[in-house]
Image (cartoon, helix red, strand yellow):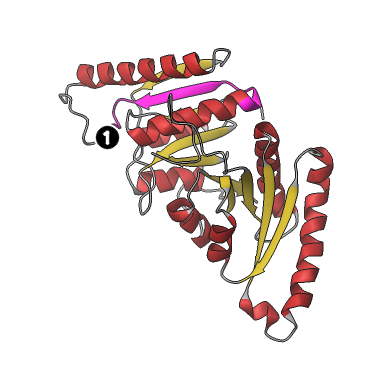
Amino acid sequence: MTGPVVVGLDGSPASVTAAWWAAREAADRHLPVVLLHSWTTQPLDVPIAQEAHSKQRYGREVLGEASAELLHRHGDLALTTELVSEPAAHALLERGESASMLVLGSRGHGSVASFLLGSISLHVLGLTPCPTVAVRAGDPAVEAGWGHLGAADRNEVVVGVQEPGATADPLLEFAFSAAAARGAELRAVRALPLTSIATRRGEDVEAEERVRLAEALAPWREKYPDVPVTKHVATGPATQVLLTASARSCLTVVGRTRHQSHLTWKLGPVAHAALHHVPCPVAVVPHD
């Protein structure tokens, strides 16, 4: 990863928390940060007049305050700001072409991203070519200002491996690099449908899948030998297995199929469930 970490910042608590998370992640990975504010796509509850110059002034204040706080916390962070007039979704998708990751704020359970309103945020999550991380306001796993340290017991990066093989490599690469950067453990989760044990002993099926998962993890364990790894194979609905496995997660990584057209996209039920219910930042990583 060499591109910047791009944050959608609108001044809401969720987007400020996202900016703090992004700054820590960028500092750990030695990457630059870009704070992006679209003055034409602002929260509906911003108490300012609707004139363009007032919106632009608000945007400059939001960017200035956040950048000052983050540079005070991470003195050597390479940080720039962008105040843009283009719609937020378009601006983020465009910068996602060269970014290492995008970071969005999320209102919390039942809704994704206050920075982008409802379906627009899902549109970005479903189409951006780079990993996108959703961060909730008040997330206990995230340092979000002075005196608001992340919970010390959140020390795992969890990655959902839907099918061991080449399609899992982008997820594993992102998850292993995140764990290495923050000195965390990695938990690779593989959920087996109940139908897989209908005609065979469950213990045998799970043992075989642990072998397959170990084979998929092997090259990444070799590349990141200092990252402790736990193989988590369980039978049951994939969403429930992932939610259970994420109890101590500081970051949960899920995948989505990469789409060639910007007219169609799909996150999938596991990604949707993780974004709405996993109690930590969630990274959605595109794969072929």
Could you say where residue 189 lies in the image, as x and y percent from the top left?
Answer: 66, 58
Could you say where residue 98 lies in the image, as x and y percent from the top left?
Answer: 58, 29
* Residue farthest along the bottom direction in this orientation: 199
Answer above or below: position of 61 versus 87.
Answer: above
Residue on which the image places disc 1: 43
Left or right, 256 with reference to 217: left
Residue 242 within the magenta-colored segment of the rendering: no
Residue, x 45% and y 23% (percent of image)? Answer: 35
Is residue 247 or residue 32 the one in the foreground? 247
Answer above or below: position of 94 versus 157.
Answer: above
Give the image quarter of residue 36.
top left
Which amino acid does the dot numbered 1 rest on?
Pro
Tag 1's secondary structure?
loop
Is residue 161 or residue 13 the one in the foreground? 13
Q: Residues within 10 Å of mark 1 (few under 14, many from 20)?
A: some
Is residue 55 or residue 70 the one in the foreground? 70
Could you say where residue 63 lies in the image, as x and y percent from the top left?
Answer: 37, 19
Give the image quarter of residue 78.
top right
Q: Which residues are magenta?
A: 28-43
Answer above or below: position of 85 versus 287.
Answer: above
Left or right, 59 with reference to 98: left
Left or right, 39 with reference to 143: left
Q: Is residue 266 visible?
A: no
Residue, x 80% and y 57% (percent of image)? Answer: 214
Could you say where residue 212 lies in the image, as x and y percent from the top left?
Answer: 79, 62
